[in-house]
Image (cartoon, rainbow, N blue to C red):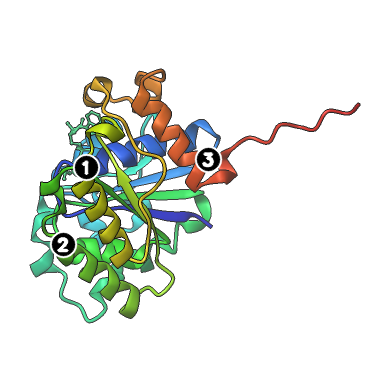
Amino acid sequence: MANIIVVTNQKGGVGKTTTCAALAGIFVSRGKRVLAIDMDPQGNLSFSLGAEDTGYTIHDVMTGECSIGDSIKSTHICDVITSNILLSGSELELTSEHREFILKDTLNTVRNIYDYIIIDTPPALSILTINAYTAANDLIIPMTPEILSLQGLAQLRETILAVKKYYNRRLNIRGILLTKYVSRLALSKDVEEMVGIVADQLHTKVLDVKISVSAAVAEAPAHQEVITKYSPRCKAAKDYIRLAESLYPEIVEKVPEQNS
Ligand SMILES: Nc1ncnc2c1ncn2[C@@H]1O[C@H](COP(=O)(O)OP(=O)(O)OP(=O)(O)O)[C@@H](O)[C@H]1O
Ligand SMILES: [Mg+2]
């Protein structure tokens, strides 16, 4: 049964898509079966993972135009369900009584063929993000360590906690992931304290692993390669591997015991 991981923050440009692509690439490199779902109308994850902009998309799945199986595209990185700009109209289109559960219900039909399903979300709080939170096992919240990135978090907190209360009691908020991190010295005490407070309010923690700023991160999507393949030696790539191994220790290969 796939572990469903959602990467979310309604703030734009905090590293959601980068984190999804990196995790997908790392899981695949460890022999895991991965499905990546792009729920952002911008389509950045689809592009980063080398998926063609044709055929059925997650919009068609959500509106019942096709089955989830029909929408899955295989790229050289992993299986992907692409997004479509039409997704931005979902709020008005998805009006059924159980509209929060559309994604969860449809994922049930493919959960047994993947180890991880990774869902990228848009920089907004909408019925799409609610569907993602309702379907998720794990939530990861990337955040840049700057004061402006803390604005609007009350709304994010309320949405997550409401979904946990009403639609998905088992939702596990794994933590706040600091991205584009320079060094502890550069992180102001105020910001550090405030991120800690936000984490407390979400009943979670600031993850120990932080993702460094690396120029290669911005270059990788143009080559439709994930950072750990495009520039495996850069700091951010190493940080993402540490993150994946710390959150999902099952991907760490066990060294066979030596017989003495
Ligand atoms: N660790 C990093 N080092 C350097 N640049 C980074 C890092 N992480 C992300 N970036 C760059 O920051 C920009 C925003 O990252 P990304 O697209 O992952 O954020 P996002 O939260 O998905 O944005 P949006 O909300 O628009 O979907 C991109 O140009 C990306 O290449
Ligand atoms: Mg994005």
Q: Amino acid at mark 3?
A: Lys
- Residue 53 in the image, given as x and y percentages of width and height: 20, 37
Nearer-the-camera pick, 160 or 106: 160
Q: Which mark is residue 125?
A: 2
Question: Dot 2 lies on which element?
Answer: loop
Residue 149, compared with residue 18, is above or below; it is below
Residue 62, compared with residue 116, is above or below; it is below
Q: Which mark is residue 32?
A: 3
* Residue 78 seen by the camera: no
- Residue 32 in the image, given as x and y percentages of width and height: 53, 40
Q: Amino acid at mark 2?
A: Leu
Question: Which mark sits nearer the N-terminus, 2 or 3?
Answer: 3
Give the CA distance from mark 3 to mark 1: 31 Å
Question: Which residue is rendered at x = 48% and y = 47% of the image?
Answer: 247
Q: Crowdedness of circle 2 by 10 Å Cα count: few (<14), some, many (20+)?
A: some
Q: Quadrant of ligand 1?
A: top left
Q: Which mark is residue 145?
A: 1
